[in-house]
Amino acid sequence: MISLLTPTAARIHINLVILLRALSGLGEGVLMPAAHVLLAQWSIPKHRSLIVSAVYSGVDTGSVVSMILSGFLCDHGFAGGWPSIFYVFGAVSCVWSIAWFLLCYNTPLEHPRMSTAEREYWKRTFDTEDSAAHPSTPWRKILTSVPVWALAIAFFVEDWGFFTVVTCIPLFIHDVLGFNMQNNGLVSGIPFMLPGLFSPFAGLFMDWLRSPGRLSTDVVRKLFCAMGFTITGCSLISLPYVGCNRTVAVLVLCIAIGGSGISNPTFVVNILDLAPLHAGKLMGLVYVVVNLAAIGAPLTVGALTSHGSTRTEWRTVFYISALMNALGGVVFVIFGSGNRQSWAEATDDKLNYESDETNNKEPVGSATDSV
């Protein structure tokens, strides 16, 4: 709805546009925590990497579609070109919201159209105790958890590279590689096809490696983090040296974003590894840190490329992002974890509840003893 109002607001005053963008950000701020609450209830642990990575591959798919379609609408759209971008995506969002309200339920067992066979399968394969538990939030233990902060740092680094690319690479492609607006949208969207394709396969491979007799979840998460960061970092370092060869530059960009398709599923599913019962709150906390990258990356690029957007200036941008990938990978490999944390168990609350119930019961025979 906010997108539909943006073109009108732009014609009235820039402050209205800023207000609408702020409101849009507030609306999107609850999206990731809410999605993780549902994923904790709708994903079987042994298939969790595949399910979560498949769901979040929609982010990359949306980036591809929006970049390509926005470039086309900007040149050939209705209502003067660029306003049609907001009208089209705003209308699609409204239709999607209606479908979401009609089809989405908190847990599989609450879904009215689930068959008896599906319901029985879910009861056999999912921890119904976790599904029914509503423990209090151990905020002190969360805020002092080393694996949580290692995840937040690594996730911040991954999104720094992502926002550098998604926000600023169109500028690099236009200023340095010389693509026009329509081709810019197409070329900018091509690299994001790879994470959308790679992420589900990466999730499937992670779950295969985590199966009994192979590797632990902890080792798998750290392995894929290191692989993704290494691929992305090396690609960004090499990008300034490809010269004016557009084909090679786009190929290197594809490899760089492809590395994100390996590391990003690790971080989004790691929240469910650490504390599935607190997935929404943990995602909210981690995403506060992650969203600093959405602010810092474009500001850094703007400051470093303010003297003409030259190849030398962009080299510095890519070096900084590659260095951050290296540091983030080291932090996660040393301090991260793929294991459920002790403070994230439901059993403690259950035992405390049962203990209280036992203490509140009147001892058997007490009435007789008092006579």
Image: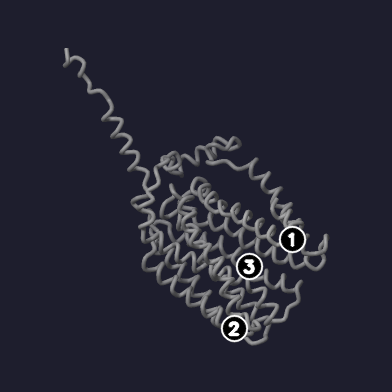
Whichever of callouts 3 and 2 sits on the residue coming sooner in the sequence is 3
Residue 61 in picture, x, y percent from top left: 64, 61
Q: Which residue is mark 2?
A: 313
Q: CA distance from mark 3 to mark 1?
A: 29 Å
Whichever of callouts 3 and 1 sits on the residue coming sooner in the sequence is 1
| Closer to the camera in the image, 360 or 16 | 16
Q: Which residue is mark 1?
A: 10
For residue 71, above or below residue 120: below
**In contact (CB < 8 Å): disc 3 and disc 2:** no
Q: Nearer the viewer, mark 3 or mark 1?
A: 1
Q: Nearer the viewer, mark 3 or mark 2?
A: 2
Asked which secondary structure carries label 3, the reply is helix
Q: Residues within 10 Å of mark 2 (few under 14, many from 20)?
A: some
Residue 283 in picture, x, y percent from top left: 48, 54
Q: Which residue is mark 3?
A: 192
Which image quadrant for residue 307? bottom right
Whichever of callouts 2 and 1 sits on the residue coming sooner in the sequence is 1
**In contact (CB < 8 Å): disc 2 and disc 1:** no
291 horizontally vs 73: left or right: left
247 horizontally vs 342: left or right: right
104 horizontally vs 323: left or right: right
Asked which secondary structure carries label 2, the reply is helix
The residue positioned 25% from the left and 23% from the top of the image is 362
* Colouring method of the image: one colour
